[in-house]
Image (cartoon, helix red, strand yellow):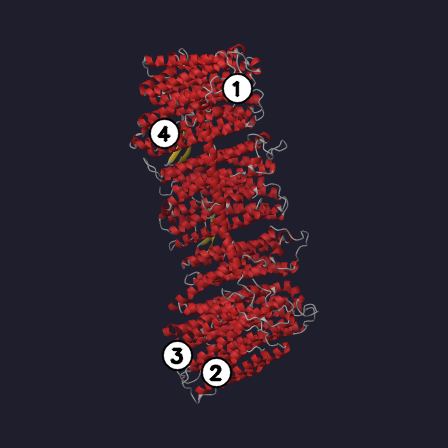
Amino acid sequence: MFTILFWVLSLLMLGSAVAVVLLRNPVNSAMCLVLSFLALAGLYITLDAFFIGIIQVLVYAGAVMVLFLFIIMLLDLKAEVRRRLNLAASAGGIAVIGGFALLLVQVVKSLPSSAHPFPALNPDAPGDVVGVGTTLFSHFNLPLQIIGVLLLVSTVGVVVLSRRTLR
Amino acid sequence: MAPSLHPWIILFAPLVASAVILFLLPRRGVAAGIVAIGAAAIACGLSWRLFLAGGSPPVAALSWLEVPGQFSVPITLILDPLARVMLLVVTTISTIVFIYSAGYMRGDEGIPRYYAALSLFLFSMLGIVLSGNFIMMYVFWELVGVSSYILIGHYFRKDAAADAAKQAFLVNRVGDFGFMLGILMFWLATGSIAFSGIEQNLASITLHPGYLTAAALLVFCGTLGKSAQMPLHVWLPNSMEGPTPVSSLLHAATMVAAGVYMLARIFPVLAASPEAVREVIMWIGAITCFAAGLMATQQDDIKRILAYSTISQLGYMVVAIAVAPASDVAVFHLFTHAFFKCLLFLCAGAVIISLHHEQDIWKMGGLLSRMPLTALCLVAGTLALVGMPGFSGYYSKDLIVAYAHEGNTAVFWITVGAALLTSFYMFRLFFVAFMGRPRSEAAEHARQAPTIMTLPLLILAIPSIAAGYPAVAHHFFNIPHHEMSHIVHYALLSALGAGFLLAAALYLRGPTKDPVRIPLFANRLYIDNFYAWLVTCVQGGLAIIGSWFDRWIIDGLIVTGVARTVWATGYILRLLQLGNLQAYAFFFGAGVLAVLYFLIFR
Amino acid sequence: MNPLYLEVAVVVLGLLLLVAESFAGPGRKSGIAHPAITGLILIFIATFWVNPAALDASAPYARFYSADSLAIFFKQIALLTTIVVLIMAQEFAPVVEANLPSSRRGAGLGEFYALPVFTCAGLMWMASAIDFVLIFVSLELVTISFYILVSYLRHDCLSLEAGVKFLVLGALSTGFLVYGITWIYGVTGQTNLNAIATVIPALKVAAAPALLFGLGLVLVSLGFKVAAVPFQFWIPDVYQGAPTPITAFLSVASKAAGFVVLLRVLQTFVVVPYLQEKILPLMALLAGVTMVFGNLAAIPQSNLKRLLAYSSVAHAGYLLLGVASLGAPFAGPAILFYLGAYLLMTLLAFLVMTIVAKTVGGDDIADFNGLNQRAPQLAFAMLLAMASLAGVPLTVGFLGKLFIFEAAYQQGHFVLIAIGIVTVAAGFYYYLKVVRAMYWQQAADPDAPGIPVGIAARITIAILCALIIWLGIYPAPLLSLIR
Amino acid sequence: MLTLGNYLIVSGLLFAIGLGGVLLRRNILVIFMGLELMLNAANLSLVAFARHGATAIGLPDYNAQVFVFFIITVAAAEVAVGLAIIVALYRQRQTAHVEDLNQLKF
Amino acid sequence: MSPLLSLILIPLVTAAFCMAGSAPRRISIFGAAANLLLTLHLMGSYSLEVGGFQFVGGRLLMASHGLAFSLGADGLSMVMLLLTTLVTLAAVWVAPDIKRHAGMFYACLLFISAGAIGAFVSLDLFFFYAFHELALIPTFLLIGIWGSGERQRIAWKVTLYLATGSFVLLLGLIGIWLAVPAGFHTLDIRVLQQLGYAGLLTPGPIVYLLVLFGFGSLIALFPFHSWAPEAYASAPAPAAMLHSGVLKKFGLYGLLRLAVPIFPAEIQQFANLLLLLLLGNIIYIGFVTIAQKRLDLMLGYSSVMHMGYAFLGFVALNQIGLAGMSLMIFAHGLTIAALFALCGEIERRVGTLEFSQLGGMAGVAPKLGLLFGFAAFASFGLPGFINFPAEVLIFFGAFARGVSGGFNAYQITTAFALWGVVISAIYMLRAYRRIFWGTRGAVVTEAIADVSPAVRWSVILLLAGLLITGFRPSLLLDYINPVFDLLVP
């Protein structure tokens, strides 16, 4: 049944992603973005990465998207008034994307392991929350600290950049 | 004072004088004169002493330029009879002319410069005489050229003088080009630059006759320049722009004879070299002596007439080198010629001074009565020059003609013709300038020149007459006794007479202007014009083309072109920085694709 | 001393600064520059006593973190740069105040001094990172702090424009980086460079495209960091728009960090022949286009900051030439030496520029006209910097180029060397444009007053000048640091 | 039967679409969304690889999942800072369009 | 440390004082004079019996490359030092009253001098090259600030041209260094020479061409000459003196130092090419020189032309030719310096150098005329000046490569070169006649003063050098000859 789920979710994700790119109004784009993120979370589940899926929902569909919408409202961006479409640019862009996709497909095909099915998982293993958690706090301690610094820096930065007047 | 030092003193006294004048007495005309004359006198005295002492005292050789084991140019002095005779001629005549100059140059602001240059000349001339190897001779050869340049350009404010000086130097340089090349060829073949060394190793070149011929003729080019042989004779008449004493000393008596002297030095080499060499030398001499005579017949400037006669006499000497069995024949004529030609010029100088620098014979006339002494000396000189029996010229010239008669009939007749021309133009000069009525104000009031100038004339008159007598000559030369056929005598005497009669017929009646006009001769066979064309058109043209190419092709097109291209490329490249974010993103993506394809599919 | 403490110390210093900043009374915030500089200097000195052996190989951080000489050298570079940048920032303070939304003196300066310290920490971690995870994280720390710093002048449209351009392109390159790492991980199953190095020789050939795909993407994003053409497009705009000290920081520290990561990654992969013969030609290609673009496009520039931006692209080109010659024995040291030299001369140039621009009020080359009359010492320092950048002998810049060319020569990159020659000549042209302005031209107003220079800046300029000449004659000290 | 390839293709397409957003849209916010899509694409393939590279004892490679966790965090921070910058820009220039950012060029 | 170090430091210190203090002219004359005296003292204390490199000293700077800062001087260096210090003294002496920051001006001159000295006494390949480059930026400033005419364009051109040239050279030097056989890990020129003579160091033809054209473009070898005439025409007289008199000689010195020991085979191999190019210098440039209408340009071209003779001596590759080349370096250096000094003086007196406007100056300025005459005659190799022995040795050296009884390329080239002597006489005498003789030119008036003492004495200094050595060439040859002893003839 995962197979069907996979196809449904991926189509949903890709479709909404395309919508993000194509829709003219930022608000709609944002909404589609949420959708595609949720679908992505679903895909994580199909890969038995429950923890990541949840984080995805929380962080992206939650925090990030709220932020986006908030900003959009704040700046109350109108729909992108149709400026003269720069044909050369769009054509170039599409060419690049196409080329990239083409290349990617070939690479995936060439990768031997890509044809293999996924190995079975150990059913009576502890949940992956445990796994990720232990790994994170035991082995990945150093990067975690750095992430902390990074968050601190970005907080300070955001404050400095968006405060109306600095004291 | 050790006799071995004498040659050095002879050589360097004039140089010292020159330096002293240049650095210590730049403003003191009289003092300069005294110093210069003193030095010349010392040299003269010592050379006489050297000559009378006889034998050749050993002379140390100083090393001058040396690359150990490879190449060395020592300073070696030769004192063989040839050199010693030459020393006498040079120093004696120089001393006389130095003294004469004191009178001639009176009142000139450039006297120190004049005497400095004159002393420098004497030094260099003596150097040529004494030098024992080619390079050393070349050194003094050049120095002679320089001093002549300075002296011809003494009146440098006159454009004519300035140009003449430049031309004289450059023409000589052209000759020296060949000279040096010849030296190089001899050195390469024989491994020596010393005359003696070359003569010893001659065997090593006689293997390559062609090479030897080329070398010998190239060295002969030096003579062409210095001794004003065709086709490099053009500078000598122009050099008459210099003061008359200079003309008489450098451009009549000594310097121009250096070429002949050099040929005499390498006479053994010439003798050993193929027939062709002597052929060429002979013909050039013959042509020169005849053509110069032709040109002389139509000149109006008293000094130019004498100049052309000098050229023609030098021609005789060159012929002599080619035809005679010994170099002394040529040097003999050089010897006599030095005296009487110097005399003639000094007479001309006296005339010019007393006519306030009037040189055109058609503005003279009747000078015989006004300055008889000068006239007398001039007659003596003339007779010597034309080869009047009993005068020195007769002996030396007849000898040459005689050898020519044995050597080559055509050349013989040419030389005889030249003799005819000689007597013609000399008597023309005499008749026009000294007989008849004065043709100008200046000539009316011409007076005898001061003693300091007349005295040298008288002194010189003596050797001009006597130097040729066998009794005298054999002290100086060992001329191979030679029974000359009568035809030579008759030919020469009739030529002399014919020339005289012709001149008398045309000019004795004292015409106010020249009854005959032959533009071809008057314009020196148009040779000067040809050179002018060569310089202005050919050389100038090449120069201008060259500089155009350098300016616009090498520099403009290539160098600047490259720079411009780089600059333009930069200008275009920076336009890629559109400033548009999306463009950047696009370039970025394209770059990514390019890199990936390069990595995976290459 | 355990090398880990270095970063810890820097971070702690940063935190203290933030605290101090928040408690410092109004108008005294600018004061916190001094403790920052002092602290960093102390840490810099400390770097000479770190003991790599103190690292616990069994500890979990060991798989991320190495403290080899390379790492230490780049930590020192990062610290040194940050110190000079902070000194520059002090000179630059008036401009910052003028462009922030506040009436109070010194408002917002505290963060302007504090953030570079955190950036420095990130750079130091980058220098030690031997695991893609740590590479990613520290690199992001650096990048994000630079986003902030570049667009710091909120009332200056240019600064903001630069910020946005940097943001978007930077994020783009991050995306490629992550995706690349993903693929490398997918093929090798590892993120640790050493582990990867052990795995790849055993890989099936069929996996090569995927591996190259990932590697290519990683290289691209590193190329973005080090300003290799065609990923240099952000450089001129961002450099010109950013606050001058930050420009210096970007052009030295972040480029250097990029190179250290690049070196580590390449060292991992070039061990495999078939990878090497694909990677090094790519590097050579990039080097060629980078040298050409950087130097030639710089020729027509009239703004000094922008000129230096292009010049930093150009220098990236020469460095890449060194990278492309990695086969040569001396290539590695040559690159590091060049980076050290580049640090000295670039910082000197930017420092002088900051000072002059602050007084004259513009950073066009024309603003330097007649500087020689007005401030001979500054003019001479700038002359020295330009000479060194151009590669005039007896300056450290020349030795850098010399070593690079030598390595390239050994590897037989003759075409590249030819390109190098032409571009170096072009370099003389645009660097001497500055000299020309300072010495040939007359000042706008001849009787302008002299230019005030802070004492710290004075000392720094003196030291930098001395080092440029001294190391240009006697490179051994710098080389011994590299060893 | 699902294979690793399916996921890789899907994620790749997502990546391409995100890139498309960056290349084609002019609104900086939307461009930013595109960037987020690219990061998520990376995450997806990362998780897929992690699942595929399950160890002998049948556990997915948690290292990779931790990495994904980091990526998500960083992305969030990036978004925060980026949006702050965009807001600052908007306050200054009243625009969020890339074409209006053209003062720095050549 | 070697006493030679002080030769380098004295100008540098003096330059520092000039930039800082007042009366730069006096200071720099003092410094230059001190340097000249020191050089003479060193020449005196150099032991000709021992020969080889003396006053050697230095220290290793970089073991990995064998890079060392080591100084030392052999006979050749001694001659170069004499040349440099003489010309430097003359140059700072004639320097006209500078309006714009004089200190800078003299500092630049001294900088160039120091660089040249450093290059001539360095025993280390790196410093040999690096010291020469010290001159680059001073030249740029000298022409750009104090030049005349299109100074800016020309300053750019010269600087970029020479910079490119020296980078080509640098590649050549790198090539040499990389060819050093393993075991001899050094940049020491002495060792390189030994290896070269021993045939152990063979970098190959490419490297030779790099070296040749690198040095060539610094020497203005045809067709890399087009920077020189304009540069000298536009540069202020002292700069032109130093640059054409000393700096240009660095290239020739380098050829003698490096190319001769290391590339004998290659020099033979490419002899015909070089013969052709040097004929370009002598004949082609000779004609271009004749066509010039301004004195400064004419002198610039003439200095390019004379380089052809030096190359002739080089390509001869035997002791005679190389000795001649060394003498030529010295001779031409002093001569051209004197000519440029006088040229500057003429311009200061009458304000123009157009032949068409000049003439008859000897009447109003006899001393100037005399000095110029000396210099001019020296420049086309009049016996009595060292120029003549130089030319003679070069011609004989080149001819020695010829075949007795035939004519080969060397001999033909020598013949043309001899014709070059005629050419140089043509343009020099032409110039002398146009400027000093004949009727007065438009700009020449009674009011014109004669040569100023400064110029007079500095030119006399140079001419004295030419004359003394010209009368006794062994004064120099004793130093030069041993240098090429090792050369296989």
Report the disc number at residue C230: none
Give the image location of residue B501, x and y in percent: 43, 12
Q: Relative to residue A124, is residue E13 drawn left or right?
A: right
Report crowding for label 4: few under 14, some 14 to 19, many 20 or more residues within 10 A (C-alpha): many
- Label 3 sits on residue: A113
Q: The residue under label 4 is which amino acid type?
A: Leu
Name which of mark 3 and mark 2 comes first in the sequence. 2
Answer yes or no: do the residues labelled 4 and 1 have beta carbons within 8 Å?
no
Q: Residue at image x 47%, y 31%? A: B532
Q: CA distance from mark 4 to mark 2?
A: 104 Å
Front: mark 3 or 2 = 2
Q: Secondary structure at mark 2?
A: helix
Give the image location of residue C125, x and y in percent: 52, 71
Q: The residue under label 2 is which amino acid type?
A: Leu
Front: mark 4 or 2 = 2
Q: CA distance from mark 3 to mark 4?
A: 94 Å
Quarter of the rendering containing residue D58: bottom left
From the viewer's side, name the closer residue of E175 and C308.
C308
Quarter of the rendering containing residue D80: bottom right
- Label 1 sits on residue: B359
- Label 4 sits on residue: B217
Answer yes or no: do the residues labelled 1 and 2 have beta carbons within 8 Å?
no
Q: Is residue A154 above or below residue E80?
A: below
Report crowding for label 1: few under 14, some 14 to 19, many 20 or more residues within 10 A (C-alpha): some
Q: CA distance from mark 1 to mark 2?
A: 121 Å
Give the image location of residue E47, x and y in percent: 45, 40
Q: Chain of mark 1?
A: B
Q: Is residue B28 above or below residue A157?
A: above
Q: Is circle 4 on the same chain as circle 2?
A: no
Name which of mark 4 and mark 1 comes first in the sequence. 4
Report the disc number at residue A11: 2
Q: CA distance from mark 4 to mark 1?
A: 38 Å
